[in-house]
Amino acid sequence: MKMPSIKLAIINISIFATLFGIQNQATALNFTIPSTVTVLGNSESGTSFTVSQNYTASDTISIEAIGVVDIFDAVLYNINAAGILTNPSLSIETGGTGTDPQGLNPTSIPGALLIGNSTLGYHSLFAATVQNGLGSSQPPTDLKETVTLESLFGSGFIGLTNGTVLNFIVDDTPGDYGDNSGSFTVKPYQEQVPFNVWGGAPITIFSTLLGISLLRIFRKKE
C-alpha cells in the first residue's frame, strides 16, 4: 500500500526538527578551564593555564569559585570571589568596600578573583551582585556562574586563540600580597540548564514523538 503523503510529511518534520535541535546545541562552545586549581591570596603571580583551542566572544565560561581570602591582615576580614566581605559587621573603614585604584583591575573590589593577562587586562570573574552576597548578612563563599566571554572580557573582545596563557589571581596592589592569606578553589561549573532552553531540544523531542504516535495510528487503520 502506498504511504499517505501525511506520513511522509510527519517523518520529514521529525527529521528536520532533530537536525535543527542538534545544530542549535552546537552553536556555542564552553570555554575549558583546568579541572581544579588553587589560587592563593598571597600569590602575586597567581595561577596560570593555557587555552587549549580557539574561542569566540559568544562562547561561554561556566565557573565555580569556593573559599575566601584576606588581603588586609585583619581577623575575620574574609572576602569571597566577588570581593564581598563575608563578615558584613566590619566597618567601611576596615576596607574592602570600595575600588582599588592601584590594583590589577581599578574597577573591581580588592580581594576579588580575576582572570586575564598583561595583554587582555584583568577582569572580575564574579560581579558584586545580590546573588553573590551584596547586602546579605551571610554572603556565600561558593559562587557559580555561566557567562559569555564577551561579557567577561568586555566590549571589543574578539576571542581567545589556542595557546593563549591566562591567569587567575586575587586583586590587590602589586607588591602588597605578602600579608594576604586564604585561597580560592576554582573549577568548571556544570550548570543545570532549564529543559526549555536546550537549543531546540523540546521541539525535537515533541515532533519526533508526535510523528511516531501518528504513524502508529495510521498503521492500525490500514
Image (tube, grey):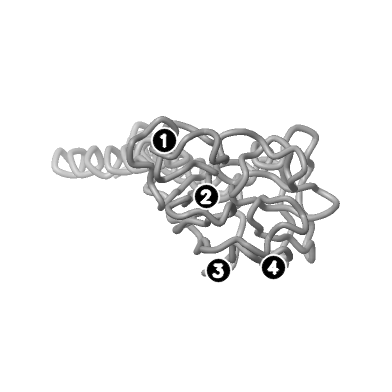
Disc 1 to disc 2: CB gap under 8 Å: no
Q: Position of residue 179 (x, y in %)?
A: 62, 62
What label sits on residue 30 in the rendered view?
A: none
Residue at 17% x, 39% y: name it: 217
Q: Is residue 22 above or below residue 131?
A: below
Disc 3 marks a residue whose amino acid type is: Thr
Name the residue that disc number 4 marks: 49
The N terminus: image quadrant: top left
Sequence-wise first label, 3 or 4 = 3
Work out whether residue 24 or residue 100 is closer to the camera in this orientation and state it.
100
Work out whether residue 217 or residue 34 is closer to the camera in this orientation and state it.
34
Q: Is residue 136 above or below residue 165?
A: above
Characterize the local packing of mark 3: few (<14), some (14-19) or many (20 or more) Cα atoms within 10 angstroms: some
For residue 11, what is the image quadrant? top left
Name the residue that disc number 3 marks: 38
Q: Residues under labels 1 and 2: Cα distance?
A: 12 Å
Disc 1 marks a residue whose amino acid type is: Gln
Name the residue that disc number 2 marks: 81
Q: Position of residue 83 (x, y in %)?
A: 54, 44
| Element type where label 4 sits in the image | strand
